[in-house]
Structure formats: C-alpha cells, structure tokens
C-alpha cells in the first residue's frame, strides 16, 4: 500500500527529472503539467494524488458548436483504444480526457506512459475534432481574415477545406 506522501514524492521526482513544465495546482497534492503538442499547441494536464489513486485529467476542446452526435461518437470510438483513460464531457459540454490509476502502481515509467497517452489523446485528434465541431465558425473566421488581409497562419492546417478561389496563397 502506497501512502499519499510517497505518491506525491514519486510524481514530483518524475516531473522534476523529466523536464516537463509543471507547477503545484490549486488543490492539495495536485500537479499541473504542460505538455507541448503538434496539432494542439499545448495540453495542460492535472495530476491529483489521493490515498488510494492518482487521477489525471486534461482539457481537449470546448463544447462543440455543431455536430455534437458526430463528435461524441468519434470520441466514444476512440475510447476503445485508449489505455487506462477515457474521454468525458463536463456540465458545460467541454471535452476532457481523464483517468485514475491505483496509487500502488504509480512509478516513473507509468507516469511517463500516462502523460504520453494523455498528450496523444488530446493532440492527435485535435484537428479532426475542430472540423467536426467548429467548421462553420472556422469558415467565418477564414472569410473575415481574408476580407481584412489578416494572417491565416493558425488556420493553414485547414486551408484545403476553407480556401476559396482567389484567396491569398499560404503565409510565408
């Protein structure tokens, strides 16, 4: 049986040695870790130690503007492939990835795997989720930026579905 102080010590040692950006959270025995992404600029994960387990959660996307059924079906199918974690929706409809592991099994290797799965779950499907849940808003944003000559840089990943004939070439 692992006590809470042993668990928090393991988590703190791992975070210090791994080089991850982190800080203490607002709750007792909480660690807030910032993980760099490819599609999503960063994923912020919360690790909370208790007497019996380590909980993890990370924000994925806000409540979709459209196609809720499609978004949620997509996430439920992905749940089948997520080891030890699952997508969840809060009261506001925002999407998180979350999980809980027994305290006795937590070591540096497990923490590395856990944060890797969290990052993959938040980052890998990010663009697909944006297209499914926010395409109308993205089109409006694209049109607004084009009409005002604003940079399209943060929308370039979606150029193939947003651009219209006559739109400016990719930002250089």
Image (spheres, grey):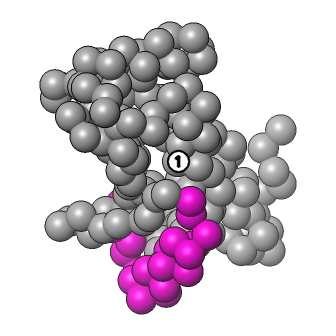
115 horizontally vs 48: left or right: right
Quarter of the picture holding the N terminus = top left
Please say if 15 is above or below 103: above
Q: Residue furthest bottom?
A: 69
What stretch of residues is rendered in magenta? Answer: 61-83
Q: Is residue 29 visible?
A: yes
x and y percent of residue 152 in the render?
66, 50
Q: Is residue 136 visible?
A: no
x and y percent of residue 46 in the render?
35, 37
Q: Residue at x 39, y 83 (%)?
A: 68
47 horizontally vs 20: left or right: left
Instruction: Pick the residue in front: 10 or 40.
Output: 10
Instruction: Pick the residue in front: 140 or 149.
Output: 140
Please say if 7 is above or below 59: above
Magenta stretch: includes residue 168: no
Instruction: Pick the residue in front: 123 or 139.
Output: 123
In the rendered image, which quarter is residue 143 located in? bottom right
Q: Residue at x 52, y 33 (%)?
A: 111
Q: Secondary structure at mark 1?
A: helix
Quarter of the picture holding the C terminus = top right
12 horizontally vs 151: left or right: left
In the rendered image, which quarter is residue 109 located in? top right
Q: Residue at x 53, y 53 (%)?
A: 122
Instruction: Pick the residue in front: 1 or 162.
Output: 1
Q: Residue at x 43, y 80 (%)?
A: 72
x and y percent of residue 11 in the render?
42, 22
Magenta stretch: includes residue 82: yes
Please say if 156 is above or below 16: below
Residue under label 1, please give it.
Answer: 118
x and y percent of residue 113 in the render?
60, 41
């Amino acid at each position: 049986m692992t006590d809470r102080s042993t668990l928090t010590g393991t988590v703190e040692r791992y975070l210090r040695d791994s080089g991850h950006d982190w800080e203490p959270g607002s709750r007792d025995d909480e660690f807030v870790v910032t993980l760099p992404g490819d599609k999503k600029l960063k994923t912020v994960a919360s690790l909370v130690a208790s007497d019996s387990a380590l909980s993890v959660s990370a924000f994925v996307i806000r409540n979709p503007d459209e196609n809720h059924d499609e978004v949620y079906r997509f996430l439920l199918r992905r749940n089948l492939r997520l080891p030890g974690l699952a997508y969840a929706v809060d009261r506001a409809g925002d999407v998180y990835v979350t999980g809980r592991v027994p305290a006795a099994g937590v070591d540096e290797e497990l923490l590395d795997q856990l944060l890797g799965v969290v990052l993959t779950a938040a980052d890998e499907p990010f663009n697909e989720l944006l297209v499914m849940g926010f395409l109308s808003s993205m089109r409006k944003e694209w049109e607004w930026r084009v009409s005002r000559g604003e940079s399209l840089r943060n929308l370039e990943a979606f150029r193939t579905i947003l651009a219209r004939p006559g739109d400016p070439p990719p930002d250089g």
